[in-house]
Image (cartoon, rainbow, N blue to C red):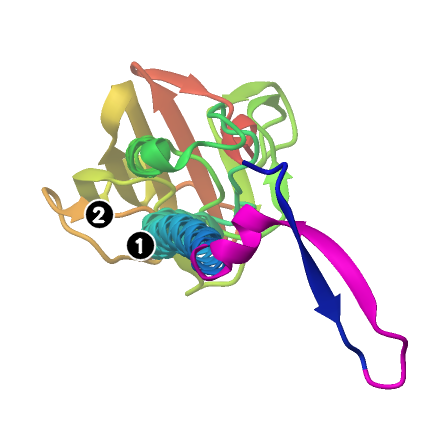
Amino acid sequence: MLKKKSSVLICIEGHKDKNLLVPTFIVKNLKNITLLLLAVIVTLAGSLLYMSYRQEKELNSRYEATLNQINQKNRQLSLKRVENERGILEAKKSFNKIDSTLAIINQKMKKRGLKTIALQNAGGPTEPDEENIDLLSEYYEEALKDLDNKLSSLPIGIPHHGRVTSKFGYRANPFTNRGREMHSGVDLKGNTGDPIKATASGKVTFSGYEGEYGNVVKIEHKNGYETRYAHLSKTKVKKGETVDAGKTVGLLGSTGRSTGPHLHYEILKDDKKINPEKYFKL
């Protein structure tokens, strides 16, 4: 079919005419072949456009999915940030409670002439996780309350800021400077009328005049402790009254067996007199 050829004259202006031998089948079916070629070109172009559209759609789909993931992550981060901020606020509230309790304890310590305390390496984790921060703050708050209760009923600190003029133990008779006698407390020098403060919380078991003690106040505390404040010029509490540590229980004087204005201060543990100076400082 392609062996038969036809001569086709090609004329180009300005150039010599040329004869081109072309299969007769192509000459006879040139129109159809041209249409077929156009159809193939259109089909290929359509396929390319379709493939390009599919790829663009797939890319858009991936982009939207990625964008959704990013937005979801951002929402999660925002929620986490809000939760963290809320956690920080709750932690601050919790530790403010601890600071408040500690401030109350320190205020009481100052009233008793003692140094203030601070929580350092109290035994808990140094970096608690957020989930346990409330439990940790509750633990410290309860521990501080328990410490406050124990410190309040323990006769520590000084009832008066005067100088110790006579220590606990045996001493010479202060009136004759002869012989030897047991001094069952400590004497603190002062001026008549100086306030005398309780060194621990407790219940007043005696307030009045008692022989060599002169005007005396006796206070019973927890765990078998008792304190006595003697030679007062005046008592400021009554029997049966409950007093807090730091409360003024009387005024310094020189009543009873006394050589001059001073406070005679005693501490008893289970009815046994002990050296008060051991309790002046923590």
Label 2: element kind: strand
User: Is residue 13 shown above or below 76?
Assistant: below
Residue 91 in view, yes or no = yes
Which stretch is magenta?
13-32
Q: Judge whether 196 appears above or below 155 on screen.
A: below
Residue 208 picture location, percent across and down? 20, 46
Determine which residue is flagged by label 2: 243
Determine the residue positioned at 47% across, 51% down.
44
Disc 2 + disc 1, Cβ < 8 Å = yes
Give coordinates of residue 120: x percent, y percent: 56, 35
Q: Camera-side residue: 247 or 134?
A: 134
Q: Which residue is mark 1?
A: 247
Question: Relative to 9, is 95 above or below?
Answer: above
Question: Which amino acid type is marked by label 1?
Answer: Lys
Depth check, front residue: 250 or 83 = 83
List the single residue furthest toward the bottom. 14
Judged from the image, the secondary structure of the residue bearing numbered disc 1 is loop
Rendered image quadrant of residue 251: bottom left
Residue 255 placed where, x, y %? 37, 50
Question: Where on the picture, by quarter, is residue 236?
Answer: bottom left
User: Is-magenta flag for residue 248?
Assistant: no
Nearer to me, 30 or 117? 30
Residue at the (62%, 19%) spot, across then down: 179
Q: Nearer the viewer, residue 145 or 209?
A: 145
**Rendered location of residue 109, percent (x, y):** 45, 47
Label 1 environment density (alpha carbons within 10 Å; few <14, some 14–19, many ≥20):
some
- Residue 242 drawn above or below residue 277: below
Count of numbered labels shown in the rendering: 2
Marks 2 and 1, how far apart in space? Answer: 7 Å
| 105 with respect to 278 (left or right) | left
Residue at image position (82%, 85%) is 13
